[in-house]
Image (tube, rainbow, N blue to C red):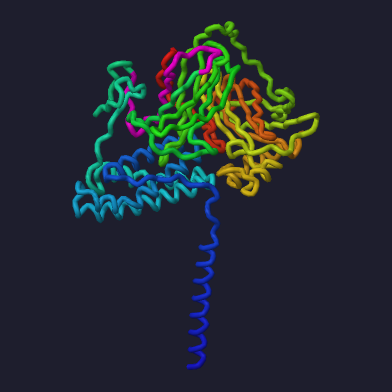
Amino acid sequence: MQQNLITRWLLTTCALASAMLIATATLAQPPHDHAEPVVEPAKTYAECISRLAAQSAAIERALASGDKSAVDTAAYTIAELAKTLGKVALTDASVSKEKVKAANLTGKEIATEAGEVHEAAEAGKLDEAKSHFGHLKPLIDKLTSGGATAPAPPEKFVCEMHCEGTKLYDAPGTCPICKMDLTALSKTPFYAKITAPGSVEAGKPVTIEIRLLDPTGNAVKNLDVVHEFPLHFMLMSEDLSFYSHEHPTRRADGVFMLNSFTFPFGGKFIVYSDFTPTGASNQVSKSEFTVPAGAIPKHEPVKLVSNYDGIGSSGDYEFRVRCNGSEFFAGQDSFLRYGIDLNHKPVADLQPLMGAMGHLVIVSADFKHFVHAHPLPLGAAAKQASPAGGGGEHAGHSHESPELMAKAKDMLLGNGTDSDVIFHAVFPEPGWYRAFAQFQHKGKVLTYAVSMEVKPNPGGAVPAAPAPGHDHTGHTPAAPAPAPAGGK
């Protein structure tokens, strides 16, 4: 009898100890070291379903392009929306009582699967994320088709050029104005509408207004702050000899203003508006317009000449750009290593610029492709980008695979110094590209540009799917938005 009591006591004690260990292990799990997007709750059941479908389509596109970051964001958004599906259905008079329970159960299933996709993408396991999405998509498809609850509203279509303003169409077809194919609203990107209230002329300051609009043409109210700003506004000349990275200020009415900007010469200019609507994926909207020369002498276009893997200067600074003698091939991992010298000594005290130890914007000569990457956490850059060093929201967090980091380490150990900064990029297609790198030292922003010709993928005519960098490597921007007043 006494032996049985002792045995039962031991079993109970072990069980309690195990439970405490499990609880402790659960509590000890480190939180994500990057900020998740703030997901605005849906106001109606129909809105919730529509947003779930849109984010599901976003994951599908991101998986096809290999953009782990976009998969991560969209899956997290789905999980947050799905958690509230039952509550939204309960408070929506258009949803019958017998459908509320089904909506609640379906929402929980979707939230669970979306969480799996989110965790896999955040860990850089794209194949695992794709596998979980195979379970998630049918749940959302069933929901939107009305199989689980009340029927979702039918898909609307829109002209991406917005020829008729915010007009939506009930069926696929072509725009009666520009004759372009209409696009499903869930697959239509956000865009920027750029205007210049005054006259635009090279050499004279001009004010530029930027309105960020959703796929229906309505103003975007909520934006995520990414790398310290809600909007990154990059202007470049058609020959890529001029580049400027600006951060317009936002008025109370939501319109962004770039005041007193001066175009250096006349000609066609391309603008990329880089922003992230809250609850949506990152957006890059391309606009183009022509600036009259005015009194400025005619600008002779500059021809791109390969000048990477060499040494150049900008002001008092000398830049050593190294690629370890390798060429660039479409669809393959590529690395650019930047060393900066001042007075013949390596600069080892770079300061964070827009929340990162450097920014690299790469644009194809035909402006079809836009790459925005940030340094890999290696060498001195890794120490400077730590939370204690003020590295911003990406500090201490990397979505890169161990294989990729191993390649990058080999690159760093080639013939550089510990203070060199390494960027990773994947060029989507062969052709000419221009890379604009920016750093900050002693409060001064340093800009240095190089050009390179990317060769066809040796494995075949079709390049490998672009792998994402720290932000949106290989991003193909939306079609050009309407030109500003005074422009083309």
Name the side, left or right, on which 393 lies relative to 282. right
Q: Main secondary structure of the magenta part?
A: loop
Res 328 quadrant in image: top right
The picture places residue 52, in percent across and down from the top left corner, at 34, 43
The picture places residue 204, in percent across and down from the top left corner, at 53, 14
* 467 up-or-down from 136: above or below: above
* 292 up-or-down from 420: above or below: above
Q: Farthest right residue?
A: 344
| Magenta region, residue range | 180-205
Depth check: give the residue in front, 250 or 36. Answer: 250
Name the side, left or right, on which 440 lies relative to 124. right
Q: Residue at x 49, y 71 (%)?
A: 19
The picture places residue 168, in percent across and down from the top left corner, at 27, 28
Q: Is residue 280 visible?
A: no
Depth check: give the residue in front, 230 or 250. Answer: 250
Res 46 quadrant in image: top left
Q: Quadrant of the C terminus?
A: top left
* 384 up-or-down from 22: above or below: above
In the image, residue 360 lies in the stretch drawn in magenta: no
Q: Residue at x 34, y 34 (%)?
A: 186
